[in-house]
Amino acid sequence: MVEKASYKILLVEDDFINGKIVKTLLEKANYSVEWVNNGKEALEVLIPNSEKYDLVIMDIQMPIINGYEVSVNLREIGIKIPIICMTANAYSDEYIKSKEAGMNDHISKPVTKTVLFEMLDKYL
Ligand SMILES: [Mg+2]
């Protein structure tokens, strides 16, 4: 089994509370986490250095550049890193749109520990 600390996750979330919750859950489980606050920062980090990260956990609704645009941009330039989005409402069309934007999967907010780690086990 690979040590979890060797997995580096980029967390992209503008909401402080949710970002803090997810980051804390991941770090308690020994994942290495870097947290940026919007889609623009995510692209700045990922475009030159995507190979440094194993997975992206990303909010959809964010200022400047939203989650859909980040994903479309990355996929257009051939970056295939797994992207899990965090959707605000399980019954909204965010999930369908996220698939269309090239994201791999989604979890609903509020994010629970069980669902989060199931998703990580699936993609890491
Ligand atoms: Mg948001």
Image (cartoon, rainbow, N blue to C red):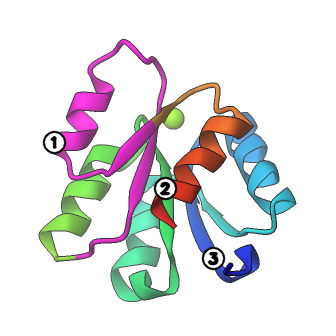
In terms of secondary structure, where does tag 1 sit?
helix
Residue type at the position of mark 2 = Lys
Q: Who is closer to the viewer here, 43 or 75?
A: 75
- Distance from disc 1 to disc 2, alpha carbons, whole Å, reads 20 Å
User: Image quarter for residue 85?
Assistant: top left
Residue situated furthest front in the rendering: 1
In terms of secondary structure, where does tag 3 sit?
loop
Question: Can you give x and y, in whole percent of width and height, for residue 89 in the image?
Answer: 45, 17
Beta carbon at label 1 within 8 Å of ligand 1? no
- Distance from disc 2 to disc 3, alpha carbons, whole Å, reads 13 Å
Residue labelled with disc 1: 100
Q: Start and end of the magenta stretch?
A: 79-106
Residue type at the position of mark 3 = Tyr
Residue labelled with disc 3: 7
Q: Which mark is residue 122?
A: 2
Instruction: Say whether disc 2 or disc 3 marks the residue closer to the N-terminus.
Output: 3
**CB within 8 Å, label 3 to label 1:** no
Mark 1 or 2: in front is: 2
Residue in view at x 81 percent, y 60 percent? 29
